[in-house]
Amino acid sequence: MIRICAVEDVPKGTVISADVDGTQIALVHGEDDQFYAVFDECSHAAVALSEGEVEGCTLECWLHGSRFDLRTGEPTGPPAIEPVPVYPVEVRDGDIYVSLTPSNGVTR
């Protein structure tokens, strides 16, 4: 697990981009108060998901509106049809840690 930032650096309902050992991730503080990490690139149009909007447990791509389930990486509607990698997140002592081994088996 690699430390990304402090919990207070990611307000609820927001997303930040982070470079984790050369892998761009979108770190999301979901509206369910959980933290999620997904590969920071839409599987449809190769644009940064971290620039999108958080809604519930989904992250919406700003370009064409594809939404990805933050728990599974699966798109919830077109135009994206391929999932994005999802990375395990742990919160320890007020800090957020991420593993670069995808929990959903999807590689980039």
Image (spheres, grey):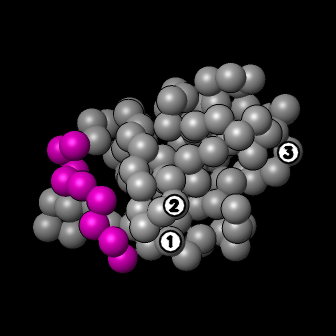
- For the residues labelled 2 and 3, the Cα–Cα distance comes to 22 Å
Amino acid type at circle 3 is Ile
Position of residue 13 in the picture relative to residue 42 (left or right): left
Residues rendered magenta in the picture = 1-9
Amino acid type at circle 2 is Thr
Furthest toward the front, the residue is 22
User: Which sits earlier in the primary sequence, circle 2 or circle 3?
Assistant: 2
Residue 96 appears in view: yes
Few, some or many C-alpha atoms within 10 Å of disc 1 (few <14, some 14-19, many ≥20)? some
Position of residue 68 in the picture relative to residue 20 (left or right): right
Residue 38 drawn above or below residue 92: above
Q: Which residue is under mark 2?
A: 23
SS at badge 3: loop
Q: Which residue is under mark 3?
A: 81
SS at badge 1: loop
- For the residues labelled 3 and 1, the Cα–Cα distance comes to 23 Å
Residue 67, image x and y in percent? 68, 35
Q: Nearer the viewer, residue 36 or 23?
A: 23
Quadrant assignment, res 80:
top right
User: Which sits earlier in the primary sequence, circle 3 or circle 1?
Assistant: 3
